[in-house]
């Protein structure tokens, strides 16, 4: 399960502390009250995106988010939702279980 994204103000603060102040992941984590893994992930994404401090003036929150996280596309090979009406009818049959339907 993925964790929710933090607000953009905090992301900008993480980037400022990392890129401008050259603080360590641990120091940034304590200063922003964020897990070290989250800070490390955002710093890594910023380096991959080639960001430097100060950020461009024309880079708004949506632009920064798209640089760091890309566009969300549906995963390839995602399984379609089962027909719940059909499942309900099949479960009414005698001796039918979810396990049998799954197999």
Image (cartoon, grey):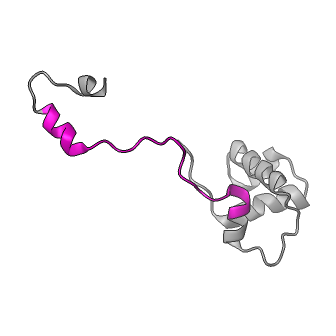
What residue is shown at x 68% (from left), y 45% (from top)? 35
Percent across and percent down for residue 102 are 30, 27
Looking at the picture, does residue 101 appear above or below residue 67? above
Instruction: Tell me if 75 is positioned left or right of 90 in this view.
Output: right
What residue is shown at x 68% (from left), y 63% (from top)? 65
Looking at the picture, does residue 24 appear above or below residue 92? below
Which residues fall within the magenta stretch? 66-91
Instruction: Tell me if 94 is positioned left or right of 79 in this view.
Output: left
Hey, which quadrant is residue 85 in on the image? top left
Instruction: Tell me if 66 is positioned left or right of 80 in this view.
Output: right
Judge by depth and name the residue closer to the eye, 63 or 42: 63
What residue is shown at x 54% (from left), y 46% (from top)? 75
Hey, which quadrant is residue 17 in on the image? bottom right
What residue is shown at x 81% (from left), y 46% (from top)? 25
Instruction: Tell me if 91 is positioned left or right of 37 in this view.
Output: left
**102 in the magenta segment:** no
Judge by depth and name the residue closer to the eye, 39 or 32: 39
Percent across and percent down for residue 9 are 69, 67
**77 in the magenta segment:** yes
Judge by depth and name the residue closer to the eye, 2 or 69: 69
Judge by depth and name the residue closer to the eye, 31 or 77: 77
């Amino acid at each position: 399960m993925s964790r929710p994204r933090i607000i953009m103000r905090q992301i900008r603060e993480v980037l400022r502390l990392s890129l401008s102040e050259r603080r360590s992941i641990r120091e940034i984590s304590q200063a922003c009250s964020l897990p070290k893994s989250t800070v490390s992930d955002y710093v890594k994404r910023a380096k991959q995106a080639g960001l430097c401090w100060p950020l461009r003036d024309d880079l708004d929150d949506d632009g920064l988010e798209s640089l760091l996280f890309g566009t969300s596309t549906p995963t390839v090979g995602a399984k379609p939702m089962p027909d719940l009406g059909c499942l309900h009818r099949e479960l009414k049959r005698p001796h039918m279980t979810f396990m049998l339907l799954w197999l």
